[in-house]
Image (cartoon, rainbow, N blue to C red):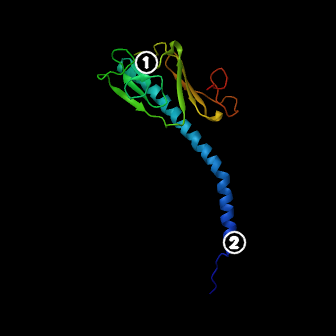
Amino acid sequence: MKIRAFTLLEMLFVVSIVAIVSLLIAPNFNNLRAKQRVTVEVNALLGALNYARLLSISKKRPVTICGTLDGTHCSRSWSQEYIVFLDQNNDAQRDEFETMVFSHRPKKDFLDITWSAFGRKNYIRYLPTGITAHHNGTFKLCHQKLSLIRAISIAKSGRARASKDSDKDGIHELGEGKPIDC
């Protein structure tokens, strides 16, 4: 009975090919993972905006979404956490009697999320009709790699839409076809 086995030379050859292929795939895998994380954060923010709008219509009450540093008070920072709450007294601050219906903490040190709006408000208030209270503007989700920068635009009608790579150059643009400027 003859036993078949691999020689040391054959084994070293296979191991070296696996190592080379792994080295070639690793950078692409990291890029794919970073792109996926950006997509997750864009979808989370889009979902929160759409949920706030839908809630304002269904509850027939103003709903506010804002960035927060402490989980309660609205601030200009959206990168640490953002919250959605029923804003009963229309002051754009969550009081203890107002129900928080959603919160999200983006992955730390990955994206810088900024909101620039008409009237320089640090929050978005959806009215019972689903439109914003003149809070149209743009979220910028900034990353150190140009190909991972994204934006979400909100119209006065309350509709939110994500940026697209319209010209297929690997960089997302705003509605006018201009690359997103972080």
Q: Mark 1 vs mark 2: give the one in front.
A: 2
Compared with 49, 30 (above or below) is below
Q: Is residue 98 left or right of residue 80?
A: left
Say which amino acid is labelled 1.
Tyr
Q: Is the residue marked by circle 1 packed among few (<14), some (14-19), or many (20+) residues within 10 Å?
A: many
Q: How far from the left and from the top, in percent, is residue 61? A: 36, 17
Q: Quadrant of the C terminus?
A: top right
Q: Quadrant of the N terminus?
A: bottom right
User: How many numbered badges does the structure rendering display?
Assistant: 2
Q: For mark 2, give the secondary structure.
A: helix
Compared with 133, 153 (above or below) is below
Q: Which residue is denoted by mark 1 in the rendering?
A: 126
Q: Residue at x 49, y 37 (%)?
A: 108
Say which amino acid is labelled 2.
Glu
Q: Residue at x 64, y 48 (%)?
A: 27
Q: Is residue 122 left or right of residue 34?
A: left
Q: How far from the left and from the top, in percent, is residue 60? A: 36, 17
The numbered disc on residue 10 is 2
